[in-house]
Image (cartoon, rainbow, N blue to C red):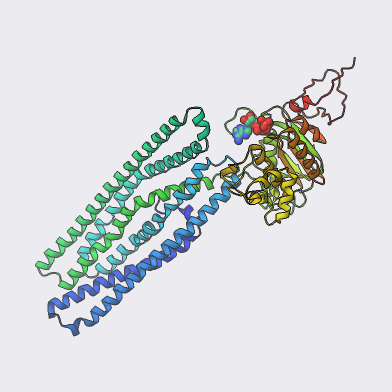
Amino acid sequence: MRPLDPRLLRYARATRTYLILSVVLGVALAALVVAQATLLATGITAVYQHGADVHRIAPTLAWLAAVVTLRAAVAWAQEVTAARASAAVKRQLRSRLLTHVAALGPGAAGGSGTIATLATRGLDALDAYFARYLPQLVLATLVPVIVLARIAPVDLVAAGTIALTLPLIPVFMALVGLHTEAANRRQFRLLARLSHHFLDVVAGLPTLRVFGRAKRQAGIIARISAEQRTTTMRTLRVAFLSSLVLELLATLSVALVAVGIGLRLLDGSLGLATALLVLILAPEAYLPLRQVGANYHASAEGLAAATEVFELLETPARPRGTAPADAPPGAPPGAPVGVASVSAGTVRFEAVAVRHAGRSTASLPPFTATVEPGELVALTGPSGCGKSTALAVLLGFAAPTSGRVTVGGQDLATVDPDAWRQRVAWLPQRPWLSTGTIADNIRLGAPGTTDAAVRAAAEQAGALAFIDALPDGLSTRLGDDGAGLSAGQRQRIALARVFLRDAPLVLLDEPTANLDASTEAGILAAIRAHAAGRTVIMAAHRPSLVALADRVIPVGTAATPGGTTVTSGGTAAIPAGATVILAGAAATSVDAVVVAA
Ligand SMILES: Nc1ncnc2c1ncn2[C@@H]1O[C@H](COP(=O)(O)OP(=O)(O)OP(=O)(O)O)[C@@H](O)[C@H]1O
């Protein structure tokens, strides 16, 4: 483990200021240590030689009191800057982590449990690194140099002894460090795995209980916990042993200096004041190095977590939102491209294919389609053919492996994804609701809208009747992910969210999947009304939903370029010898296939 990971300076600017302050305070502290030792040696020698003459030693005592007070003040300043720096660094790293995880998109960042552990407990462990390890590291480089500079002119032998023995401590520390870095990372990974698994089990507890697997999961958690305990104990063992070795080394070194001084005092080749000065200063030279060793282990966990954060930050997000090198003149490479021109344009999938990492087959086979502004289209096809994936590409959650999507003639890959998403409203297949009130949930995509508008959107989505029946109406607080609502109710709240957001492009993934026929009829009419002046693309299975569309676009095998798409309610002439594939929901809405002689 490097004592100071340069990435910490890059990703957390607060580190830089803190390091500069630490060095300034470190120099002040080292100078005060030397001053204190000098004053002590002078004072003790004066008392020894002239007796306790208050007048003679009063100035020394006054200076000593001043130095001690100053030393305390510098130590206090060190603590305060360390605590502030630690808080600032954690805030900067957390915010970068969350922004980057959002940019990576769903499922791309190693699991929610891992990220939650990293962002909370993991980064919190950086406190020890900033508050204890880094200041000591700065002192460990400054104090020995300043102490040696003070001792060398008065006692070269002692200075030589210290200079020879001091490097042994960092050498041993490096040896120990080689061993502990891997152990600490392993320990942290185990902790992240434990959190991830725990979160997963808690979320799936009802299912696990019904299928009789809850005990087994408890067993797995117990096993991971035991592994984590063993690793922690191993790390602690190394920590304690290395502290012992470092203490021993420092004590022996000071003893060596002391014996040398004693012998030279006896034969009269060394004065009492000098001997005292060296004796007081020698342990101070070793102290910060010993402290670095002792604090190394406490801080290693935080640094291991920070390393994991850096690795995550260095996972490249999809290159969306930046202009490619061959962008048209006026758009410098890497510059985000505005969305004004693309917001209301034609959406064109040009042979867009998606293959997720680790999958042998394409999630979306080459898909070509054009959706004109103001159209309401249904993407149809058998389950798993790639309808949701096509929507994910439009949302910027999945990157095309080949082909491209253009909106208003502009490649979506060159558009700033956040700005683009502001023009989009989305109803996912499994809508997510946050803890908070129903009104907060509906307002998610349109913050600041009035209560009346929220009510109107809820009514449009057929949700107002059941919301009003709840004790607190729109102010009813929901549990985790909408706990306390039925699937159909959750869906309608999510739909109200879409209706409230005034977006020119609306993406709906099976918007009526969980609704009964009569509720569905109302929702279909509401979708139709909302579609006026907007482009709506729906992933659809149900015939009623497919029938609502102006046009049906098959996804998957039927969507071969050059094929014939039959508009809802229309007819098509199919050339002789052509293969006819009636895919998914489209097949159910075909009234007749007449084969001409
Ligand atoms: N994040 C992912 N990682 C790996 N494979 C994925 C991922 N998302 C989807 N797939 C795969 O891509 C294929 C298409 O999935 P998609 O959800 O787009 O289908 P769909 O047509 O919307 O299906 P349904 O009608 O059942 O909702 C599936 O085989 C699925 O397993």
Whether residue 253 sits left or right of residue 367 in the image: it is: left
Q: Position of residue 555 (x, y in %)?
A: 73, 30
For the C terminus, which image quadrant?
Answer: top right
Residue 255 image offset from top left, x and y in percent: 17, 58
Q: How many marks?
A: 0
Q: Nearer the viewer, residue 407 or 328?
A: 407
Residue 184: give x, y in percent of width and height.
Answer: 38, 44
Residue that lies at the very extreme toward the left in this rendered image: 267
Dividing the image into four quarters, tell me where ligand 1 lies: top right
Q: Is residue 294 left or right of 47 when viewed as pictured?
A: right
Residue 61 position (above or below residue 357): below
Q: Which residue is drawn at the image coordinates 29% and 56% (left, top)? A: 290
Q: Residue at x 80, y 21 (%)?
A: 580
178 versus 567 height, above or below: below
Above or below residue 279? Residue 563 is above
In-image side of 474 versus 225 (left or right): right
Do we see residue 15 in this rendering? yes
Q: State the residue at coordinates (30%, 47%).
A: 239
Q: Residue furthest right?
A: 597
Q: Examine the rendering and report whether any part of residue 364 can be seen.
A: no
Q: Position of residue 456 (x, y in %)?
A: 74, 50
Q: Quadrant of residue 47?
A: bottom left
- Pick the front one: 261 or 369: 369
* Residue sitting farthest toward the bottom: 55
